[in-house]
Amino acid sequence: MKNFEKKLRLLYEKMDNAYDKVCKYYGFECKGCTDNCCYTLFFHHTNIEYHYLITAFLKIDLNKQKKIIKKAEKSIEEINLTGSNKRLKNICPLNIDGLCIIYNHRPMICRLHGIAHELQRPQGVVFGPGCEAFTKTAEEKKYFKFDRTEFYIEMAKLEKEFKQIYNINKKFKKTIAQMLIAKRDKLQKEIN
Ligand code: SF4
């Protein structure tokens, strides 16, 4: 597991460096806003990131963990009621007072969100505009190429390796709240 954690950390570092470079060019800094990405409904698709995130979650003080789980339950209720609405009323359960409590362990999509980007797909290049705050800051500037493709490919390779070693066959698709509840349920099963 340690070896996988190291590989994942290195990949995250690459993403963070590329992201910072682009932010520097635009003069963009994410300071938290009403359009906060932690209110956005995202699904995460890798077991390896799930394990990495849960490792950090389990290090949080137990009382806080319980509060976070309560928030996760509320968040899931909302998703079940509203369906795949992109913007949620409940912030991500791991966001406490505007800050991500597992910041260094946050998944790829949280790291790459916010800035204009592109992705090479078999059918052609797909462009993404970035968040509202970014668009306001960057409107005067020319597009600075931020290609997510190599990060997605490297993550997919790492996930494949991880699934092979740990004999995992199922595909993964969960929001952060669903990840936390899945872990709670697994822990409960182990106790019973
Ligand atoms: S994991 Fe952290 S960065 Fe990602 S949505 Fe939750 S609080 Fe925000």
Image (cartoon, rainbow, N blue to C red):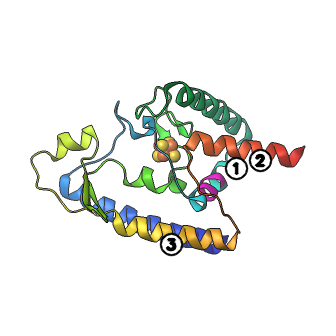
Q: In this view of the protein, which residue sits in the foreground, 111 or 181?
A: 181
Q: In this view of the protein, which residue sits in the foreground, 148 or 30?
A: 148
Whether residues under marks 1 and 2 lie with C-beta atoms below 8 angstroms apart, the answer is: no
Work out how far the residue at label 1 is from the one at label 2, CA to CA, in angstroms.
13 Å
Q: Which of marks 3 and 1 is nearer the N terminus?
A: 1
Amino acid type, mark 3: Lys
Residue depicted at x 41% and y 35%? 86
Q: How crowded is mark 1: few (under 14 residues within 10 Å), some or many (20 or more)?
A: few
Q: Is mark 1 on a helix, strand or loop?
A: loop
**What label does residue 58 carry, if any?**
1
* Position of 20 relative to 90 (above/below): below
Residue pointed to by mark 3: 157
Q: Is residue 169 magenta?
A: no
Q: In which quarter of the image is the C terminus?
A: top right
Q: In which quarter of the image is the N terminus?
A: bottom right
Residue depicted at x 53% and y 67%? 8
Residue span colored magenta: 50-54
